[in-house]
Image (cartoon, rainbow, N blue to C red):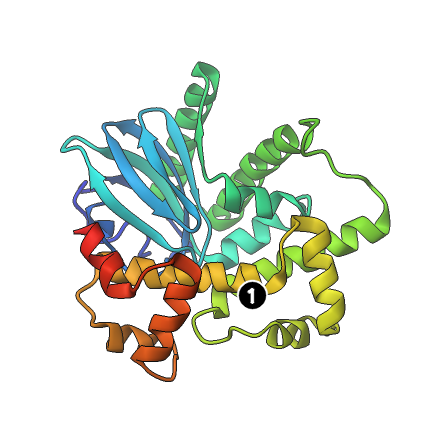
């Protein structure tokens, strides 16, 4: 595949996955969400990325996990930056991920970039090679099933390693699992709806629980308030639009469903201590 492909996460029609090589140039200062997901291995070079709440550097032998519906942007990169990638639809990911520990999805969201050991790099190279063979073997009647199983195996291996670490290991009681599940569903809903819905009551209704119960779950699991998580997601998206687009503050207010530019300005200043215009000037 051409390393300068327009969008490596845009899958061919009727395909549930894609394997190839890319410089990810499509995502330079990109302002939006990825419809599909991807697992990537950085082969050379380096890049500064924004991936949901993660801001950091991707270097050679780093793995990158992009979940479907993620905010993803590259703010700078070296001329030789290149990744191998396996991208997939939300449907394929959902089928592969149904056995995962509940807390693992939150960990993937929080820690999307990891440095692999030598064995880890070799294993991922072999895994990507096998996926490439499956991608090209279009006559195989079990092609999608094979790929789904390979994705599931990779996720289960990663989940096992993460969940065995003492600092992340979960208690097995039912009530804890239930609270973690609700919290994870809340985080996913916020990721999808925070640009239009900023009240805790909306998310409680979507989860079929009371606002008070949702607030207590979020505080217990994360130590934060539900409103602070919603507001943080909104601020992150506003910053991304200010930094990576030429949209006016009024246009951003319209896109983010604020009543007007002044309302957005007060909201932004309250949470960052500066105006949207001042933030944009600092990023130039």
Q: Which of 8/221 is in front?
A: 221
Residue 71 in picture, x, y percent from top left? 38, 55
Residue 64 location, quadrant: top left
- Image position, residue 229 (x, y; %): 55, 59
Residue 259 falls in which quadrant of the image? Answer: bottom left
Task: Give whichever of 44, 244 is nearer the camera.
Answer: 244
Q: Quadrant of the N terminus?
A: top left
Q: Pinpoint residue 217: horizontal percent, then vertical percent.
A: 73, 58
Q: Quadrant of residue 137?
A: top left
From where the camera sits, is residue 69 visible? yes
Between 86 and 70, the residue placed more toward the observer is 70
Instruction: Tally the marks.
Output: 1
Lateral position of residue 280 relative to residue 255, left or right? left
> What residue lies at 31% left-to-right and 42% top-to-bottom?
49
Instruction: Give the farthest residue toward the bottom.
Output: 259
Name the element at disc 1.
Answer: helix
Please say whether residue 13 is visible from this viewpoint: no
Q: Residues within 10 Å of mark 1 (few under 14, many from 20)?
A: some
Q: Residue at x 68, y 44 (%)?
A: 101
The residue labelled by disc 1 is 189
**Residue 133, percent across and down?**
37, 36
Q: Is residue 108 above or below residue 276?
A: above
Residue located 68% across and 30% down the image: 167
Q: Residue furthest left?
A: 79
Q: Nearer the viewer, residue 58 or 284?
A: 284
| Outermost residue toward the top in this view | 118
């Amino acid at each position: 595949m051409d390393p300068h492909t327009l969008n490596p996460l845009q899958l061919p029609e009727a395909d549930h996955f894609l394997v190839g090589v890319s410089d990810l140039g499509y995502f330079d200062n990109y302002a939006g969400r990825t419809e599909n997901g991807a697992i990537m291995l950085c082969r050379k070079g380096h890049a500064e990325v924004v991936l949901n709440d993660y801001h950091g550097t991707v270097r050679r032998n780093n793995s990158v996990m992009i979940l479907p519906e993620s905010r993803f942007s590259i703010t700078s990169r070296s001329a030789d930056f290149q990744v191998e990638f396996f991208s997939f639809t939300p449907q394929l990911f959902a089928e592969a991920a149904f056995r995962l520990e509940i807390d693992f999805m939150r960990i993937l969201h929080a820690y999307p970039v990891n440095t692999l050991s030598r064995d880890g790099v070799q294993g991922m190279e072999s895994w990507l090679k096998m996926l490439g063979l499956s991608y090209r073997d279009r006559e195989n009647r079990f092609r999608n099933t094979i790929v789904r199983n390979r994705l599931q195996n990779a996720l289960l291996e990663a989940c096992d390693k993460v969940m065995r670490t003492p600092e992340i290991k979960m208690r097995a009681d039912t009530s804890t699992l239930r609270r973690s599940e609700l919290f994870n569903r809340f985080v996913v809903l916020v990721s999808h709806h925070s640009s239009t819905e900023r009240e805790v009551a909306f998310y409680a209704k979507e989860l079929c629980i009371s606002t008070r119960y949702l607030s207590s779950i979020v505080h217990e699991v994360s130590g934060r308030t539900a409103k602070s998580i919603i507001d943080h997601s909104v601020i992150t998206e506003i910053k991304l639009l200010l930094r990576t687009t030429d949209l006016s503050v009024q246009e951003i207010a319209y896109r983010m469903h604020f009543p007007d530019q002044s309302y957005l300005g007060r909201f932004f200043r309250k949470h960052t201590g500066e105006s949207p215009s001042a933030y944009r000037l600092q990023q130039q």
